[in-house]
Amino acid sequence: MSRLTGLGRRLLAGAQSTAARMLFGAVAVGLAIWFVASRWNQVVDALARMQGRWLLLAVLATVANLLLTERFRDQVNVVRASWPGGSATLLFTQGDNGKAIR
C-alpha cells in the first residue's frame, strides 16, 4: 500500500509541475487553433454577421474579467484542504506559499 501511495505522490507532483502545466496549455491552445482553423469560413461568416455593439460588449466584459480576477496585490485566498486522516485551512497571499491557520 505504501508503494502505491508513493507512486500517487510522484504522479501528483509530476502533474503539478511547471512542465506539465506548460504542456497542458500548449495542447489546449493547439486544439483551439485547430478548431477555429477547421471552421474558418463559419468563423468569418459569424464575425461578419455580428453587430459591432455586441463585439464591443464582449471585449469590455473580457477586460473587466481580467481586471477583477486575481489582479490585486493585497488579495488573500483562504482554502480548506481535506484528506483522509486530516484537514487544514490554508492562507495564501501574493508570492508566498500557503500558511496553515490554527
Image (cartoon, grey):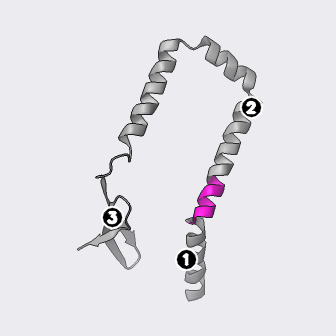
User: In this figure, which residue is indicated by the disc labeled 2?
Assistant: 37
Q: Are marks 2 and 3 in contact (CB under 8 Å)?
A: no
Type of amino acid under label 2: Ala
Q: Is residue 1 visible?
A: no
Task: Determine the secondary structure under disc 2.
Answer: helix
Type of amino acid under label 1: Arg
Cα–Cα gap, marks 3 and 1: 20 Å
Quarter that holds the N terminus: bottom right
Mark linked to residue 81: none
Which callout, 1 or 2, points at the residue further toward the start of the chain? 1
Is residue 55 part of the magenta span, yes or no? no
Cα–Cα gap, marks 2 and 3: 42 Å
Task: Determine the secondary structure under disc 1.
Answer: helix
User: In this figure, which residue is indicated by the disc labeled 1?
Assistant: 9
Q: Nearer the viewer, residue 51 or 6?
A: 51
Which callout, 2 or 3, points at the residue further toward the start of the chain? 2
Q: Position of residue 4 (x, y in %)?
A: 59, 82
Looking at this rendering, what residue extends furthest in the right direction? 38
Q: Which residues are magenta?
A: 17-24
Q: Are marks 3 and 1 in contact (CB under 8 Å)?
A: no
In the picture, residue 67 is in which quadrant?
A: top left
Q: Position of residue 44 (x, y in %)?
A: 69, 19
The residue depicted at 66 percent of the width and 50 percent of the height is 26
